[in-house]
Image (spheres, grey):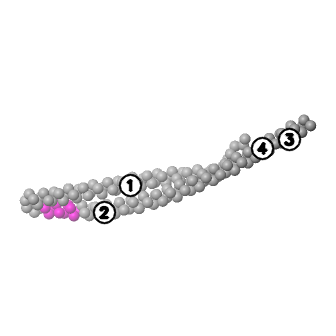
Amino acid sequence: MAKFIYRMQSVLDIKEKMEEQAKNEFAGARMHLDEEEEKLNILINRKEGYEEQGRQLQKSGLNVLDILSNRDAIARMKEFIEIQEKAVIAARTQLENARIKLQTAMQESKIQAKLKEKAFEEFMKEENARESKEVDELTSYTYGQKK
């Protein structure tokens, strides 16, 4: 039996490498988004802590400097949160782009794999036909020799 050689194997290999690279990019984008969301949660928790501290300061007495510095801290946290929310949106956009790229790479890789599978099936049909022809010729030769 002859050996099957897929003539577009190099294209299939490239598509598989591109798919692997897209998977890695997607995983990196997912990690980046998780990190940005974690930073946002930390900032929100800090702001809530400052707000609680402000309520305690207002209950305990009227230390104006402490209350003013607390309000400034809350205002800064709001600014940081707005900046971090923009970073989270950018990370989500980057993740979506990586997802689309991964999906495209996976489709292209699957197409090449199916083409290889069809080429192998065609090879097997041709090989079976060739073997059948050889058996027929051998049978005809053997039968012809007996007469």
Label 3 near label 4: C-beta < 8 Å?
A: no
Looking at marks 2 and 4 on the same chain, the residue that comes earlier in the sequence is marked by 2
Q: Residues within 10 Å of mark 2 (few under 14, many from 20)?
A: few
Looking at marks 1 and 4 on the same chain, the residue that comes earlier in the sequence is marked by 1
Residue picked out by circle 3 = 140
Q: Which residues are magenta?
A: 67-76
Looking at marks 4 and 3 on the same chain, the residue that comes earlier in the sequence is marked by 4
**Horizontal arrangement in the rendering, residue 25 relative to residue 16 (left or right):** left
Report how far apart the C-alphas of labels 2 and 1 lie in the structure: 16 Å
Label 4 near label 1: C-beta < 8 Å?
A: no
Q: Which SS class for mark 3? A: helix
Q: Nearer the viewer, residue 144 or 61?
A: 144
What residue is rendered at 41% in x and 62% in y? Answer: 93
Point out which mark residue 132 bears: 4
Report how far apart the C-alphas of labels 4 and 3 lie in the structure: 12 Å
Residue 24, image x, y percentages: 46, 51
What residue is rendered at 14% in x and 63% in y? Answer: 68
Residue 122, image x, y percentages: 69, 50
Point out which mark residue 32 bears: 1
Amino acid at circle 4: Ser
Task: Indicate which label's residue lies in the foreground, 2 or 4.
Answer: 4
Residue 52, image x, y percentages: 17, 57
Q: Nearer the viewer, residue 43 or 122?
A: 122
Residue picked out by circle 2 = 83
**Horizontal arrangement in the rendering, residue 25 relative to residue 88 (left or right):** right
Q: How many marks?
A: 4
Report how far apart the C-alphas of labels 3 and 2 lie in the structure: 85 Å
Task: Name the main secondary structure of what is drawn in magenta.
Answer: helix
Q: Which SS class for mark 4? A: helix
